[in-house]
Amino acid sequence: MKRNLSAKLHLALTVIWTIVALYMIFLYAPQEATMGEVQRIFYIHVSSAWTAGTAYLLVFVSSVIFLWKHSTRADELAHSAGEVGFIFCSCVLVTGPLWAKPAWGIWWAWDARLTLTFVLWLLFVSYLMLRSYVSNPARAASLAAVVGIIGFVDVPIDYMAIRWWRTQHPQPVIAGGSGSGLDPRMFLTFMVSVGAFHCLFFYLVRERMGLARARRQLGAIRRALNS
């Protein structure tokens, strides 16, 4: 009962937070002087990117715990975060070119950050394919954990790409030094959007964990009936 109530409260918070974020993105935040209305994609694009990074961090930490302690719950958390993170990473790859084309006149093809984000997307795909196509569940979990740990190196490199290589971005918008930054209303909108995306992410992971738990319990019941 408490778990159901907590899930309902989490869902309500996610819905309210998302509505507030959408209001701020399209109505509260001022129009950017250079890019105009298309700049509003920024709030969705970057929020998705930060959430995808959080997802892979969760995959990394959970994979380490799984290999260390052989924790079923850690393995389920890594799997859940990988599935949900794949969705947010896909959103980054879709919104990036949509934002870049009208803003800079190109589709942002082979930009260092986009390329590294595509690598991260491929890591999510590889992680999930190992889960699906390796017949032995224990071996699949172990192999996926290795991918989750080794692949995490792409996340900090992706984040630092603008600073380390010449990209289509003139400089980082957040914490980019002199001349960077956002209008206070834009920054507030951005932070609310990041919070809303993370709230949605953790709700989806929570629901996916519940599904994994139900499958595990069903498997135990079937084994008991067959014995």
Image (cartoon, rainbow, N blue to C red):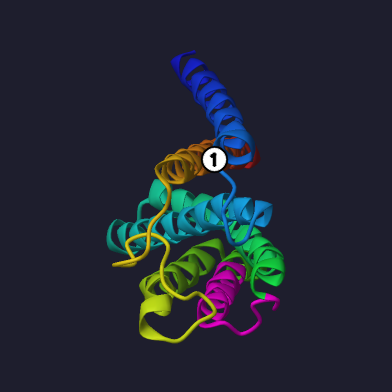
**Nearer the observer, 61 or 137:** 61
The crowd level at tag 1 (other Cα within 10 Å; few <14, some 14-19, many 20+) is some
Q: Position of residue 109 (x, y in %)?
A: 66, 82
Q: Quadrant of residue 127?
A: bottom right
Q: Is residue 123 above or below residue 194?
A: below
| Quadrant of the snapshot with the C terminus | top right
Q: Which residue is mark 1?
A: 29
* Residue at screen point 43% across, 67% down: 145
State left or right for residue 102 relative to residue 73.
right
Q: Is residue 9 visible?
A: yes
**Nearer the observer, 227 or 201:** 201
Q: Which residues are magenta?
A: 105-126
Q: Position of residue 54 (x, y in %)?
A: 42, 55
**Nearer the observer, 118 or 45:** 45
* Residue at screen point 49% across, 68% down: 144
State left or right for residue 194 relative to residue 211.
left
Q: Is residue 217 visible?
A: no
Q: Main secondary structure of the magenta part?
A: helix
